[in-house]
Amino acid sequence: MLIGIDLGTTNSLAACFRNGKVEIIPNRLGKKLTPSVVSVDDEGSILIGETAREYGYLHPERTAKVFKRTMGTDHEYDLAGMKFSSEELSGFVLRSLKEDAEVYLGEPVHEAIISVPAYFNDNQRKATKRAGELAGLTVSRIINEPTASAIAYGVGEEGTVERCMIFDLGGGTFDVTILEYFKNIMEVYAIAGDNFLGGEDFTQVLVEMYLQRLLVASVNLLDLRTLSNIYKAAEEAKCSFSDHDTVTMAVNVFGVLHEEQFTVAEYEEACRPLLEKLRKPIEKSLRDAKVTLDDLDRVILVGGATRLKIVRDYVKKVTGIYPDWYVDPDTSVAQGAALQCAMKERDRRIEEVILTDVCPFTLGTEVVRDNGAFEEPGHYLPIIERNTVIPVSRTQTVYTAHDNQKIVTVKVLQGESYMARNNLLLGSLTVEVPVGPKGQEAIEITYTYDVNSLLEVEVKVVSTGLQKKVIIQNEENKVSEEEARKRFERLQYLKQNPREEEENRLAMFRANRVYEESLGSDKDRIGEMIGEFDNALNNSTRLEVELTRKKLEDLLDEIENKGFTGLIS
Ligand code: AMP
């Protein structure tokens, strides 16, 4: 079975296409969203999703989140002495989604279409693919998140040509896509974005506002757990700006409850630099697509952070268009990925959608330029220009730069700067050439960018016919097959928290956290209930455990929903 997966910075989810419609696949806790969080508990087991997030509030040093931001880099997360890359952590999240899908669908799931931010570069895309493989999934396609959302919005709609802008602000990334639909033809014109801008930055603003009010001389004085509590309070406060003009943050700092109120006007002012950062990709995408705001029929909002009213207001102000967000912004990407699965399997119930996508970056190589007086090294020669429709294959011919040159090294670069060194080095390829005077040997460099936005480079020495071909992989991240196999095995053998214990562990972690956060009689009541639940876990039947857990959850709901006044009493 093939499923669609939205592997998000904050949350992930899976969906499939069955019996002619998209189904969102619930996780083991019956929820549609699985937080992209991984922890290693004190017994060395791996926790994933909501259980990991809850555990992480009290054990931030054993928990990794927002790791999608370092996808494709060699950054390592140290969880209780075990080191993991973003790719491996994402592999755990994917494995959990795969297992949940198998239970829900009642059949094995071996294949997936996974979405990535449109602005993800080649390294990040390949790392995502490998993460899928670590989870035991064949990733048959990588799809751009905004394109997936556009499919969720557009498929099946009849009629006129529509030009739209998809404004996708997720937890950690921002993409703007300009596309056109006409019946079943969907054409992406341009993509622009920022891989380091998302909802988490809007949370960080509130964290900083709170820290300023605290007047703590140095943030370094605060321990990790307090900082993690402040972050949690900021995240909740940010989300409640959706229906309140004033929000409260209350956190225990050095044993004292510090309660602070913030108005939406203050927040908007503090977020001004972030909002301004949204403008540039909007302008760039329109420019690249050769479209003006007047040509746009619709602006579609996607991604959890577009729930922020200040973001929606800003989009409206900049574009002059009242944006749409009628497909659930949390699930539209997964829905689109599931529809893409149906298209791949040529499900007759879905009209074949012809989709053209673009390559969001310029891809090129480094060359020496003769400026008439002397030779200048370090120039960038674009081979595939950004926003070219994919799949695409382009060839450029370069010549030897020195007399008696024996080898030619082709650097594969990605970026927009005319100076080669300012662009991202994706890899390099070396070929031998017959010696001779400079300029004698011609080398043809062919870049092929496929529908999954994965790059293949072929270098050919014209005189000898010698050819070399590689799928580009960053030198630093290059892993041998042997290493990849070992890594896969290591991850497979790590103990994972058993599915059937998930709800109990989650309830216990949550109870411990609320216990720590509470004061007075609430603390006593939770303490008693924790004892009762612990006892049930050790001595009772499954049904009794479930009843006790329900009682504990009701109590926690009551205390948490009472809000901050409960903490003070
Ligand atoms: P995504 O990656 O699309 O799941 O988006 C996740 C981001 O959306 C996170 O930064 C969340 O804090 C943010 N988010 C989710 N719900 C809300 C809300 N009601 N108000 C503001 N931000 C939200």
Image: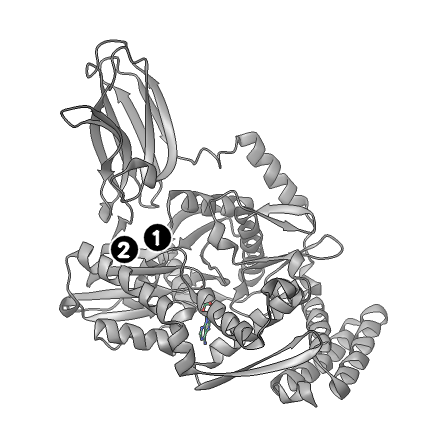
The residue located at (48%, 76%) in the rendering is 238
Residue 180's x, y, as percent? 20, 61
Given contact means CB atoms under 8 Å apart, are the residues at marks 1 and 2 in contact?
Answer: yes
Residue 403: name its quadrant: top left
Furthest toward the front, the residue is 217
The residue located at (65%, 41%) in the rendering is 490
Please say whether residue 156 is visible from this viewpoint. Answer: yes
As displayed, is residue 484 above or below residue 429?
Answer: below
User: Closer to the camera, 541 or 186?
Assistant: 186
User: Closer to the camera, 386 or 261?
Assistant: 261
As displayed, is residue 490 above or below residue 68?
Answer: above
Residue 218: name its quadrant: bottom right
Residue 112's x, y, as percent? 45, 51
What residue is disc 2 on?
191
As displayed, is residue 332 above or below residue 564?
Answer: above
Residue density around tag 2, few if under 14, some if 14–19, many if 20 or more, within 10 Å: many
In the rendered structure, find residue 133 and report the number of the disc placed on it.
none
Query: For the residue labelled by badge 2, is the local secondary structure a helix, a strand or a loop?
Result: strand
Residue 409's x, y, as percent? 34, 23
The residue located at (53%, 52%) in the rendering is 90
Q: Quadrant of ligand 1?
A: bottom left
State the separation of the CA atoms marked 1 and 2.
7 Å
**Count of labels in the image:** 2
Query: For the residue labelled by badge 1, is the local secondary structure a helix, a strand or a loop?
Result: loop
What's the amino acid at mark 2?
Ile
User: Closer to the camera, 218 or 409?
Assistant: 218
What's the amino acid at mark 1?
Tyr
What residue is disc 1 on?
119
Residue density around tag 1, few if under 14, some if 14–19, many if 20 or more, within 10 Å: many
Residue 422's x, y, as percent? 33, 41
For the C terminus, which image quadrant? bottom right
